[in-house]
């Protein structure tokens, strides 16, 4: 829209000078009306005085030019037709609406106006203060027991009983970790109290109708992908902010979304498989076809995520690929059902025994650049997955490389039923089931060169949860309570990416979770959880060794 209507109206009013007396009077009224309208717009802050004066001068100039032209054509006389009052009122209203619309669109008449591109930026974030108590069972295996059993337990090979050595096995390498003096540094029996804080700040930018992006900073570290907590008590030192998300998003149509970079979790899931704080690195595409009735909303999601870069000759690349199909069915106005079936595949994750050719022929210590490439790194793992020592036979080095015993190709079925019959309170039932279809004891025995003949270990897990209250606690006095039971076998999922709070993280755990949330104010929430977990199978070859821990968490969370 251009500023022409107002100028034309002013010109019409100002041309009236040479007309007859009655016509002159009518146009003088029109002129004064228009000028008064401009003054009113200035008084109301719609126009600045500078812009108003400029419009009047422009109109006067055009009026003079028009009068001169018409006077020349008609011998110096200009005749203007009478303008009825109703027409003048209509012109006045049209001018007003056009000026207001243009001012709104172009933001040229707003006091302290900000650039329009800022409207495409959205900020989000949260601050959380947490008290956490870790309460260990006094009958747990000690870290020394776990460390000893992992590396030195007696095993039977071809009917001959011998010390573990190359046949070492564990499900809790970190609990059995030792320092350079051989002293165990884990904790399985001493209770721990701590305060923790989490801060996250994100920016979402809508660049066009199709392109957008997001960046989020968070507390935490580059060695813990499933937690953004910062524990207080670091000698009053400052905290580290890391890039938690950085991604591009492309929405070419309503039914397709493509996201790439460090992206939010693209799967319909629970924390049985994926921790709530986990973000993914790679590319994901989601298809959401629509139907006329709009009560059934199917979806398909594909994803490819590099876990470790290909780095010849030091290591092979590791990838996770996934596919999920499902639908949301709005059964009625107060009943909603959602289900998704996912298949994930991890490539080059499983451990293999290193070749003896990788050792020096004199010292029998590793010399190959790719020695240790099959390790399931301590920077990645939590605990629970079955591990074996991948060191080559005869390796005299002091470093143990722990590799995953099983391959991983889990299938995951997730379902949720939302019942809003008691609105605003809801009853939400959630069920999650997972099974690692690649778990094969015979294949493990062959791939580990007969080092690991598993007789225990589980390749499945499930979780049932009921939530009563508001689906999301946002306003003051909103509330929610929930209870869940979880059973997650040792090799059902990769333990690095599952929940970091239940049992202090990892797999091979069963137990329950109780919790509640209450809205203290708008976007201010008080939350409490009690998580009770026990080990399913032994973390070592000694079946008497167990691990149990109860975790209590009390949070105050502020969102903006």
Image (spheres, rainbow, N blue to C red):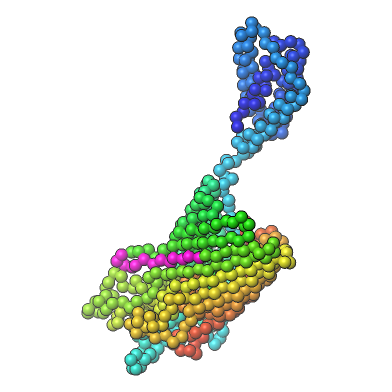
Residue 541 picture location, percent across and down: 44, 87
Residue placed furthest toward the top = 75
The residue positioned 47% from the left and 83% from the top of the image is: 457
Return the residue nearer the eye: 280 or 162. Answer: 280
Which quadrant, please, contains the C terminus? bottom right
Return the residue nearer the eye: 85 or 503. Answer: 85
Q: Is residue 374 visible?
A: yes
Which quadrant, please, contains the N terminus? top right
Residue placed furthest toward the left = 362
The residue positioned 46% from the left and 57% from the top of the image is: 261
Residue placed furthest toward the front = 292
From the viewer's perspective, tell me whether residue 41 is left or right of residue 314: right
Residue 150 picture location, percent across and down: 41, 84
Q: Is residue 314 magenta?
A: yes
The residue positioned 33% from the left and 93% from the top of the image is: 160
Q: Which residues are magenta?
A: 312-324
From the viewer's perspective, tell me whether residue 30 is left or right of residue 453: right
The residue positioned 69% from the left and 30% from the top of the image is: 94
Q: Is residue 50 visible?
A: no
Is residue 21 placed above or below 383 in the rendered structure? above
């Amino acid at each position: 829209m251009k500023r022409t209507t107002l100028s034309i109206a002013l010109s019409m009013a100002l041309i009236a000078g040479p007309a007859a007396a009655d016509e002159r009077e009518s146009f003088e009224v029109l002129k004064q009306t228009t000028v008064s309208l401009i003054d009113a717009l200035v008084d109301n802050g719609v126009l600045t005085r500078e812009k108003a004066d400029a419009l009047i001068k422009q109109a006067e100039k055009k009026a003079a030019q028009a009068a001169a032209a018409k006077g020349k054509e008609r011998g110096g006389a200009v005749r203007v037709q009478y303008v009825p009052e109703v027409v003048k009122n209509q012109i006045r209203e049209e001018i007003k609406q056009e000026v207001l619309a243009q001012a709104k669109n172009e933001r040229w008449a707003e006091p302290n106006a900000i650039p329009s591109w800022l409207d495409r930026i959205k900020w989000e974030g949260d601050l959380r203060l947490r008290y956490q108590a870790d309460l260990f069972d006094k009958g747990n295996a000690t870290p020394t027991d776990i460390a000893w059993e992992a590396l030195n337990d007696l095993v039977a090979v071809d009917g001959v009983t011998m010390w573990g050595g190359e046949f070492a096995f564990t499900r809790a390498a970190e609990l059995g970790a030792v320092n350079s003096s051989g002293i165990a540094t884990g904790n399985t029996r001493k209770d721990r109290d701590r305060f923790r804080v989490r801060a996250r700040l994100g920016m979402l930018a809508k660049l066009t109708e199709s392109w957008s992006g997001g960046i989020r900073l968070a507390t935490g570290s580059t060695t813990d992908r499933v937690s953004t907590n910062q524990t207080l008590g670091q000698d009053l030192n400052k905290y580290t902010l890391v890039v938690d998300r950085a991604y591009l998003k492309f929405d070419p149509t309503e039914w397709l979304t493509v996201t790439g970079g460090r992206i939010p979790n693209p799967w319909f899931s629970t924390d049985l498989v994926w921790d709530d704080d986990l973000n993914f690195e790679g590319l994901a595409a989601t298809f959401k076809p629509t139907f006329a009735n709009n009560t059934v909303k199917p979806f398909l999601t594909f994803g490819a995520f590099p876990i470790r870069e290909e780095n010849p000759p030091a290591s092979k690349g590791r990838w996770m690929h996934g596919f999920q199909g499902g639908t949301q069915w709005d059964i009625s106005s107060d009943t909603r059902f959602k289900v998704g079936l996912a298949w994930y595949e991890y490539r080059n994750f499983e451990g293999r025994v290193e070749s003896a050719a990788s050792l020096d022929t004199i010292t029998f210590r590793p010399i190959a650049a790719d020695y240790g490439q099959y390790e399931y790194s301590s920077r990645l793992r939590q605990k629970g997955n079955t591990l074996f020592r991948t060191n080559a036979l005869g390796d005299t080095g002091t470093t143990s490389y722990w590799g995953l015993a099983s391959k991983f190709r889990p299938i995951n079925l997730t379902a949720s039923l939302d019942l809003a019959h008691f609105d605003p309170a809801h009853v939400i039932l959630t069920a999650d089931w997972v099974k690692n279809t690649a778990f094969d004891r015979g294949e493990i025995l062959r791939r580990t060169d007969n080092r690991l003949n598993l007789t225990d270990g589980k390749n499945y897990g499930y979780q049932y949860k009921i939530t009563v209250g508001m689906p999301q606690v946002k306003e003051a006095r909103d509330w929610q309570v929930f209870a869940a039971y979880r059973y997650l076998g040792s090799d059902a999922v990769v333990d690095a990416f599952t929940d970091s709070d239940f049992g202090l993280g990892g797999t091979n755990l069963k137990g329950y979770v109780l919790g509640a949330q209450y809205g203290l104010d708008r976007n201010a929430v008080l939350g409490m959880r009690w998580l009770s977990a026990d080990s399913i199978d032994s973390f070592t070859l000694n079946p008497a060794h167990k691990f149990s821990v109860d975790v209590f968490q009390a949070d105050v969370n502020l969102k903006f």
